[in-house]
Image (tube, rainbow, N blue to C red):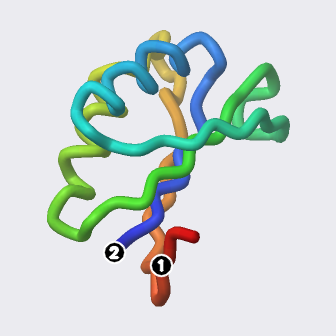
Amino acid sequence: MKMIIAILKDDDIESAVQALTAASFRVTRVASTGGFFRKGSTTLLLGVDDEKVDAAIQVLREKTTAAPNEKRGTVFVVPVSHFEQI
């Protein structure tokens, strides 16, 4: 299992979350600030099976926008050593 941490512009969040949930990914939104975009951003957390990481990242690519020479977002993929729903 992997944890995907995606930091996206606030403008892209609604379409990204809708597309991810429509594709059966479970998403947690966290309001965040920082130096990635120098304006509003939101962090998405997704617990994803290893074989579905590429599909989740593809949804993020499709649902984010950018002007020329601008980044669409930052995505970290982190291994999960233990997962438990309580």
User: Residue 17 location in percent, x, y?
Assistant: 45, 26
Task: Tell us which disc is closer to us: 2 or 1.
Answer: 1
Which of 73 and 27 lies nearest the eye of the viewer? 27
Residue 1 circle label:
2
Classify residue 60 as left or right of residue 42. Answer: left
Check disc 1 and give the amino acid type.
Phe
Name the residue at the front extreme: 86
At a point 53% along the width and 45% down the height, the residue shown is 6
At a point 49% along the width and 27% down the height, the residue shown is 72
Around disc 2, counting alpha carbons within 10 Å, would you say few (fewer than 14), some (14 to 19), or many (20 or more)? Answer: some
Which of 52 and 39 lies nearest the eye of the viewer? 52
Residue 83 circle label:
1
Q: Is residue 8 above or below residue 11?
A: below
Name the residue at the bottom extreme: 81
Check disc 2 and give the amino acid type.
Met
User: Residue 24 location in percent, x, y?
Assistant: 26, 38
Which numbered disc flags the more N-terminal residue, 2 or 1? Answer: 2
Classify residue 81 as left or right of residue 29. Answer: left
- Whole-number angstrom distance, CA of label 2 to CA of label 1: 8 Å
Q: Secondary structure at mark 1?
A: loop
Which of 31 and 67 lies nearest the eye of the viewer? 31
Quadrant housing the C terminus: bottom right
User: Residue 3 location in percent, x, y?
Assistant: 46, 64
Around disc 1, counting alpha carbons within 10 Å, would you say few (fewer than 14), some (14 to 19), or many (20 or more)? Answer: few
Q: Secondary structure at mark 2?
A: loop
At a point 39% along the width and 19% down the height, the residue shown is 18
Classify residue 69 as left or right of residue 34. Answer: left
Residue 57, located in which quarter of the rendered image?
Answer: top left
Mark 2 near mark 1, Cβ–Cβ under 8 Å? yes
